[in-house]
């Protein structure tokens, strides 16, 4: 049996997981940004995968880990000397490569319905929508923050006057064009930040949430039947206010420690991933001072290696075990 990994050449997660494979020759790595001994092609006879010119039947692929193969994986192809036209041409090439990789995944799933995907790209895409995440999490029993998404300034002002609030981006990831990219983080917002309040509507929706009073934040990583919870102690007095608002702003200075989740919260995390059709997910939540666990969001393809290095939790090993033995370890 073979295990296929789709990622890019700078992905340290792949190396960390590969170390735990019993037979490294079974670990097939497709780097979409470069050529290798592993290649794939489509003809009228169907999709074909070759390793060292040897045909690998799609039915022999037991698991596929779709780690990182979005167009962002190609950002290092751009140079300072590129013209706008050259950037567009490279963007076109990267989008074509991503589309072909998705075709490959779909053909493997078609040829081998029992193949494990971590995760199938359509499941990842469907679960990117943050408001749907909140709805699904609430439906299984999670507490979620008071939330408003609206273009209506009257509704926005009413919400801001009723809650200490933050604003977030509604989409996953950042904004990029060619070699330029930016990610918009969580920001505190008040009614005084609203410009031209007499204007009835914004040009696009505004995503607002209650700024939940927290004791600390948690990143809960689910890998098949295993769960790893990390506590971010980001309410310390010596931390910047933006780090207290969102641990991502102070990731290097915030203490990371392993955390024991209550059994009920663990089961709710597993239930959420099953409901979403996922085998992997990184859940962000808040532990409040009054003992509540508040769901914020889930990233179906989030990073985990830095948490493993900070805490010693064997997350790479768990991923390798999931890929090598799906029947035993899948959700």
Image (tube, rainbow, N blue to C red):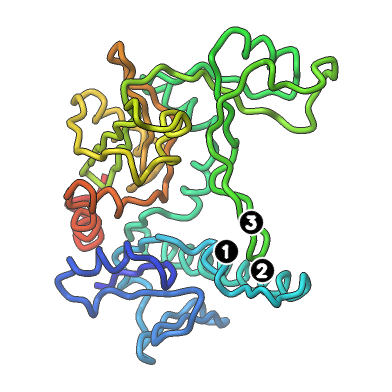
Q: Residue furthest left?
A: 22
Q: Position of residue 38 (x, y in %)?
A: 40, 83
Would you identify the image quadrant in which residue 141 lies?
top left
Between the residue at mark 2 and the residue at mark 1, the CA separation in whole angstroms equals 7 Å
The C terminus sits in image quarter: top left
Question: Which residue is drawn at the image coordinates 77% and 23% (left, top)?
Answer: 195
**Mark 1 neighbour class, 10 Å CA radius: few under 14, some 14 to 19, many 20 or more:** many
Q: Position of residue 278 (x, y in %)?
A: 37, 45
**Residue pointed to by mark 1:** 71
Of the two numbered discs 3 and 2 on the same chain, state the one appearing first in sequence. 2
**Residue pointed to by mark 2:** 91
The N terminus sits in image quarter: bottom left
Of the two numbered discs 2 and 1 on the same chain, state the one appearing first in sequence. 1
Dot in front, 3 or 1: 3
Question: Which residue is drawn at the image coordinates 56% and 30% (left, top)?
Answer: 187
Is 1 displayed left or right of 157 in the figure? left
> Marks 1 and 3: in contact by CB < 8 Å?
no
Disc number placed over residue 176 in the picture, else none: 3
Is 221 displayed left or right of 134 in the figure? left
Is 58 displayed left or right of 2 in the figure? right
> Marks 2 and 3: in contact by CB < 8 Å?
no
Q: Residue furthest bottom?
A: 53
Dot in front, 3 or 2: 3
Q: Residue furthest front?
A: 238
Question: Which residue is drawn at the image coordinates 44% and 63% (left, top)?
Answer: 110
Of the two numbered discs 3 and 1 on the same chain, state the one appearing first in sequence. 1
Between the residue at mark 3 and the residue at mark 1, the CA separation in whole angstroms equals 10 Å
> Marks 1 and 2: in contact by CB < 8 Å?
yes
Q: Position of residue 299 (x, y in %)?
A: 43, 43
């Amino acid at each position: 049996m073979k295990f296929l990994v789709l990622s890019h050449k700078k992905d340290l997660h792949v190396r960390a997981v590969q170390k735990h494979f019993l037979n490294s020759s079974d670990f097939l790595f497709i780097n979409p940004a470069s050529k290798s001994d592993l290649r794939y092609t489509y003809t009228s006879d169907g999709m074909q995968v070759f390793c060292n010119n040897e045909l690998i039947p799609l039915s022999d692929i037991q698991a596929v880990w779709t780690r990182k193969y979005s167009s962002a994986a190609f950002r290092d192809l751009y140079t300072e000397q590129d013209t706008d036209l050259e950037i567009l041409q490279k963007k076109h090439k990267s989008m074509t490569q991503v589309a072909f990789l998705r075709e490959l995944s779909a053909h493997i799933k078609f040829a081998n319905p029992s193949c494990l995907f971590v995760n199938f790209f359509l499941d990842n895409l469907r679960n990117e929508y943050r408001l749907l995440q909140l709805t699904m999490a609430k439906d299984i029993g999670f507490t979620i923050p008071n939330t408003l998404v609206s273009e209506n300034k009257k509704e926005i002002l009413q919400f801001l006057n009723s809650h200490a609030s933050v604003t977030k981006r509604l989409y996953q990831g950042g904004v990029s064009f060619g070699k330029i990219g930016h990610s918009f983080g969580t920001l505190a917002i008040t009614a005084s930040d609203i410009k031209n309040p007499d204007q009835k509507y914004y040009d696009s929706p505004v995503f607002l949430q209650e700024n939940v009073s927290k004791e600390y934040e948690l990143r809960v990583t689910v890998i098949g039947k295993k769960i790893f919870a990390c506590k971010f102690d980001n309410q310390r007095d010596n931390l910047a206010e933006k780090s207290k608002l969102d641990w991502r702003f102070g990731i290097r200075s915030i203490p990371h420690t392993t955390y024991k989740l209550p059994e009920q919260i663990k089961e709710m995390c597993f239930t959420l991933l099953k409901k979403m059709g996922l085998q992997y997910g990184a859940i962000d939540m808040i532990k409040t001072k009054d003992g509540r666990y508040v769901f914020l969001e889930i990233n179906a393809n989030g990073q985990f290696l830095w948490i493993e290095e900070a805490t010693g939790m064997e997350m790479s090993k768990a991923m390798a075990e999931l890929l090598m033995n799906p029947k035993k370890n899948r959700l």
